[in-house]
């Protein structure tokens, strides 16, 4: 699998670190335990399109949001986390 | 039909015309007392023990492909009970005891081979950790022996003891560990369950779970609706997808794990060996092929095939430990989808839906668990209550904080 980094171009996935699903909303510090439980532990774990965080550790070191199909590994979109979603 | 030496001899003289299929191919009934979703080792073992130990025989196992087509047929067949934490060790030791009597119980040759599992260590820190884990195993009634480098050398002479970076200092050996024949485990449980009246229904995918007023009523399948008193999920890597049909969201991510087998060679690795300086393990099949594997690929996947960086990583670890394998050819590699849980330990429990039960989170170690998983899951389903052996393996442990994190890696499934 190769990931097209917006800064470095297409690179092998071994250059990247994987961090799991992107876009989980972090609860407030005083939110109830159930919200923290859901945030820390529960995942949709979808078959198909998945927005996820990768860091280009052996390249530009930027965090990226990659939209990838978990069944075919086709990558539909890659954006720097600092770039607001369209 | 009972298998025996006498039967083999008799069939040999009669041109092998008397063998019958080991299980039936029934048409689904309209209603079952219990439906088990997933015809892997765990699902079939569950059905077997429901019938054998709890007298519940109006049971169906629904499998979307053929039985054993998931991880049960893809794993590297290692069995062991060498865990550190009490919540795990009681359970895996129970499983080891069931393995030790499995062939007699099932009247099926599951080729359980107690050739030992040897965890090699390369530093003083790793030796301390191994000693601690070995002590924990012994406190739970399992066996564990700490070996020095000379003792390890006597067992596996061709390993690279004087590697400049990873010199071998010794190992933690569990002699009762070893391997079993994965397909035979599936077939043995299937035959045992079928003989006690369980319907094994293949090519039957569960596409919906009917829940009314908080209680499970049955399942929609590609072969029509089937009503059920209780439904147990044993879907391994597909657990999140199937549980979502009942509205559940779980502490699980699906990841791919690869395995490899080499061409057959003369006996070289007489036990199961794990490398301490990287994630790598190796054993040798009875046919002579070296069977080995390493890390999961590390990102969510339902693809049942892995990527090349892990192939390279595994090959490098193999060379670091066993340089003499350098010119050996790899025959096959494959991948299976694992249900990686958030603490790296399994879940066998009730769910918030009445009558719906969950068996999941096996990560890459669920084959060795097969007998105890089925045994405990059958108990949970029959009594609507967890057995003491799995008191720690609850679904709510993530909420209560009583997680079973062997590795201490936190809620990051690709690190377990
Ligand atoms: C490469 C590899 C190596 C491994 N090595 C080891 C090892 O050495 N030792 C060890 O202890 N463990 C090992 N494991 C882990 C072990 O194989 C699994 O944890 C274990 O097999 C999971 O339980 P199971 O046998 O019931 O799973 P599976 O065989 O995967 O059974 C689940 C079944 O559910 C079915 N299913 C899914 N969705 C549906 C649906 N909607 N309707 C109907 N059926 C459905 C699937 O088709 C599948 O047959 C390894 C795994 C892999 C992939
Ligand atoms: Zn980059």
Image (tube, coloured by chain):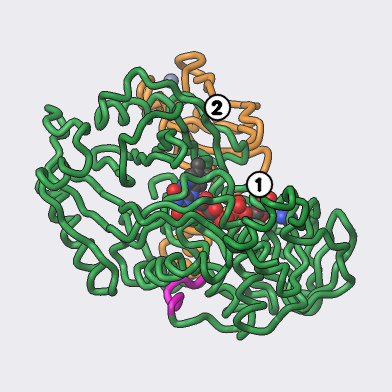
Chain colours: A orange, B green
Residue placed at 22% from the left, 45% from the top? B120
Residue placed at 60% from the left, 66% from the top? B45
**Tally of marks:** 2
- Is residue A54 shown above or below B350? above
Query: Residue B373: horizontal and vertical position, in percent?
Result: 52, 67
In the rendered image, which residue does mark 1 sit on? B69
- Quarter residue B205 falls in: bottom right
Q: Is residue B43 visible?
A: no
> The disc numbered 2 marks a residue on which chain?
A
In the rendered image, which residue does mark 2 sit on? A79
* Ligand 2 found in image quarter: top left
Callout 2 secondary element: strand
Query: Residue A9: horizontal and vertical position, in percent?
Result: 50, 14
Label 2, ligand 2: CB separation under 8 Å: no
Query: Residue B168: horizontal and vertical position, in percent?
Result: 15, 39
Disc 1 and disc 2 on one polypeptide chain: no
- Is residue B96 shown above or below B77? below
Give the left or right position of residue B333, taking residue B279 as reference. Answer: right
Main SS, magenta residues: loop
- Quarter residue B391 falls in: bottom left
Callout 1 secondary element: loop
Q: Quadrant of the N terminus of chain B?
A: bottom right
Residue numbers of the magenta segment: B389-395
């Amino acid at each position: 699998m190769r990931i097209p980094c917006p800064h470095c171009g297409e690179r092998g996935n071994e250059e990247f670190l994987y961090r799991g699903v992107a876009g989980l909303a972090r609860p407030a510090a005083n939110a109830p335990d159930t919200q923290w439980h859901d945030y820390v532990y529960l995942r949709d774990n979808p078959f198909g399109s998945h927005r996820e965080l990768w860091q280009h550790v052996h390249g530009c070191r930027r965090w990226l949001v990659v939209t990838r199909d978990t069944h075919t590994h086709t990558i539909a979109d890659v954006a720097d986390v600092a770039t607001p979603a369209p | 039909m009972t298998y025996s030496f006498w039967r083999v001899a008799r069939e040999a003289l009669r041109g092998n015309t008397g063998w019958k299929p080991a299980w039936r191919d029934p048409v689904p009934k309209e209603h079952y007392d219990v439906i088990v979703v997933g015809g892997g080792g765990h699902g079939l073992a569950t059905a077997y023990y429901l019938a054998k130990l709890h007298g519940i025989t109006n049971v169906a196992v629904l499998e979307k492909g053929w039985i054993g087509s998931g991880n049960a047929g893809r794993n590297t067949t290692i069995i062991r009970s060498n865990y550190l934490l009490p919540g795990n060790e009681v359970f895996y030791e129970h499983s080891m005891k069931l393995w030790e009597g499995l062939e007699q119980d099932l009247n099926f040759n599951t080729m359980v081979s107690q050739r030992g599992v040897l965890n090699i260590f390369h530093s003083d820190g790793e030796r301390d950790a191994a000693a601690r884990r070995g002590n924990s195993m012994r406190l739970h009634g399992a066996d564990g022996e700490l070996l020095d480098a000379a003792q390890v050398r006597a067992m596996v002479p061709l390993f690279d003891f004087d590697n400049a970076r990873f010199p071998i200092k010794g190992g933690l050996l569990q002699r009762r560990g070893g391997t079993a024949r994965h397909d035979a485990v599936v077939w043995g449980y299937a035959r045992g369950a079928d003989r006690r009246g369980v319907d094994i229904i293949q090519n039957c995918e569960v596409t919906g779970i009917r829940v009314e007023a908080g209680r499970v009523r049955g399942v929609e399948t590609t072969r029509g609706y089937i009503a059920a008193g209780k439904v147990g999920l044993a879907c391994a890597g597909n657990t999140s997808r199937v549980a979502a049909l009942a509205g559940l969201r779980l502490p699980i991510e699906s990841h791919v794990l690869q395995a490899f087998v080499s061409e057959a060679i003369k006996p070289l690795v007489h036990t199961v060996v794990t490398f301490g300086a990287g994630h790598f393990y190796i054993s040798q099949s009875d046919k002579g092929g070296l069977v080995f594997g390493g890390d999961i690929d590390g990102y969510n996947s339902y693809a049942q095939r892995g990527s090349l960086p892990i192939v390279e990583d595994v090959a490098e670890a193999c060379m670091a430990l066993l340089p003499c394998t350098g010119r050996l050819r790899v025959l096959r590699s494959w991948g299976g989808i694992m249900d990686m849980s958030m603490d790296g330990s399994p879940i066998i429990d009730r769910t918030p839906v009445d009558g719906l039960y969950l068996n999941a989170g096996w990560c890459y170690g669920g084959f060795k668990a097969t007998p105890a998983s089925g045994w405990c899951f059958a108990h949970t389903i029959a009594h609507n209550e967890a057995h003491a052996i799995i008191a720690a393996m609850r679904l709510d442990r993530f909420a209560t904080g009583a997680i079973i994190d062997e590795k201490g890696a936190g809620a990051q499934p690709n690190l377990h």
